[in-house]
Amino acid sequence: MALFDLKDFDNHEQVVFCSDDESGLKAIIAVHSTKLGPAVGGCRMWDYASDEDAITDVLRLSKGMTYKNAMAGLTMGGGKSVIIGDAKKIKSDALFKAFGRALNGLGGRYVSAEDVNITTGDIAVVNTETDFVTGTEGKSGNPAPFTALGTFLGIKAAVKHKLKSDDLSGLTVAVQGLGSVGLYLCEHLHNAGAKLVVTDLNQEALDKVQTQFGAKIVGLNEIYDQDADIYAPCALGATINDGTIDRIKAKIVAGCANNQLAEPRHDQALVERGILYAPDYVINAGGIINVSFEENYCVDQATAKVEEIYNTLLDVFEKADSTGKPTGEVADEMAREIIAKGGK
Ligand code: NAD
């Protein structure tokens, strides 16, 4: 594999491959940019089909963090890490400690937090070996409720722009993924009067959302075909692809998942179908914004900053209208401008 030539490599400052025989740790840490500050981004644990898939994922996610942190107005660069393996089988204190020692080796150029399959408890174990973690219990804690709040406000901004309404009541939202973020998001949407159509692999989560919020449950592959006003991808990435794009009936795509577009060209493809896309790294920045308040944590300050996502997205939508460019491209340009200026 020609790592430097990969399209997702995009001038990463540093990519570190870590392994530890005793605990079985196999991890990749990607530091995309430290231009605005130390690279901050979560750690994902996933049973990748191949090492190439893991590399692609970590590179795309870490570049996304650079853009996300810039657009959120944070003095942080972008990075991400992945631990390779099945979370149900490989988790151990020894493994997270080994990962902590690997983080230490970067001397603070990268600071890790939670992402898919990594809990605050796991980060607490990493924290026994290194200070270069954030989102810890007793400080900013679990970022998921803040990611959900930002995503909810982002959905409201998209509804305001596309449907000219401040009211979600009666609208149907198709939520794909009822994990740490998806469940909180469903609660916000239900409280705002939205109807929910949901899917997940996890029956317990489905039962919960059906009982508590009256959600309709559909099969994993049926979520794209729903008569919904909003499609909210809240599981994994690349669900907007050649196989799904023509099936989406919703007028808005707005959810918390990272890297929702399989290819950059799907940004324009959504425009051609008359669908408003809330760029993933703008709408899902609530968690990282909360984490940025880790030291001297104040929930009110963090919440106020998360609420800025609403106006940032309106700004992106308006610029897209005035320039005729797709929203993802507009967000990328805005982020690059912020980075070039050295911060917001
Ligand atoms: P999670 O692991 O808690 O939840 C993911 C959920 O998706 C699980 O319930 C899982 O069963 C479900 N799922 C997996 N494959 C699915 C499929 N094919 N169809 C339907 N459901 C499926 O993860 P999370 O923390 O809730 O994160 C969700 C997404 O949001 C991820 O893409 C993550 O990178 C992104 N994100 C999370 C945060 C955060 O604060 N946790 C912040 C920013 C972005």
Image (cartoon, grey):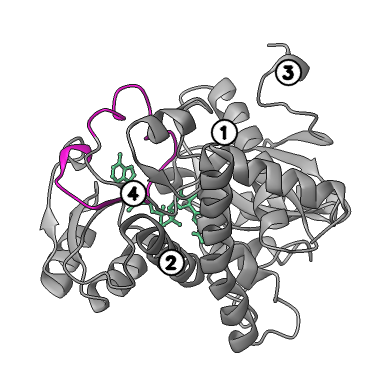
Q: Nearer the viewer, residue 267 or 12?
A: 267
Amino acid type, residue under disc 2 in the picture: Ala
Q: Earlier in the sequence, mark 4 or mark 3?
A: 3
Element at label 2 = helix
Residue 150: give x, y in percent of width and height.
49, 67
> Taking 264 as reference, is 251 left or right?
left
Element at label 3 = helix
> Taking 110 as reference, is 19 left or right?
left
Q: Earlier in the sequence, mark 2 or mark 3?
A: 3
Query: Does residue 68 show up?
Result: yes
Q: Earlier in the sequence, mark 1 or mark 2?
A: 1
Query: Separation of disc 1 and disc 3 at Cα?
Result: 13 Å
Label 2 belongs to which residue? 148
Query: Separation of disc 4 and disc 1 at Cα?
Result: 25 Å
Q: How many marks?
A: 4
Element at label 4 = strand
Label 3 belongs to which residue? 3
Amino acid type, residue under disc 1 in the picture: Asp
Element at label 1 = helix
Query: Separation of disc 4 and disc 2 at Cα?
Result: 17 Å
Residue 33: give x, y in percent of width and height.
81, 44
Q: Nearer the viewer, residue 261 or 15?
A: 261
Query: Separation of disc 1 and disc 2 at Cα?
Result: 22 Å
Q: Earlier in the sequence, mark 4 or mark 2?
A: 2
From the viewer's perspective, is residue 133 above or below residue 333? Answer: below
The residue depicted at 17 percent of the width and 37 percent of the height is 225
Q: Which mark is residue 57?
A: 1
For the magenta stretch, what is the residue range? 224-247
Label 4 belongs to which residue? 252
Residue 227 located within the stretch drawn in magenta: yes
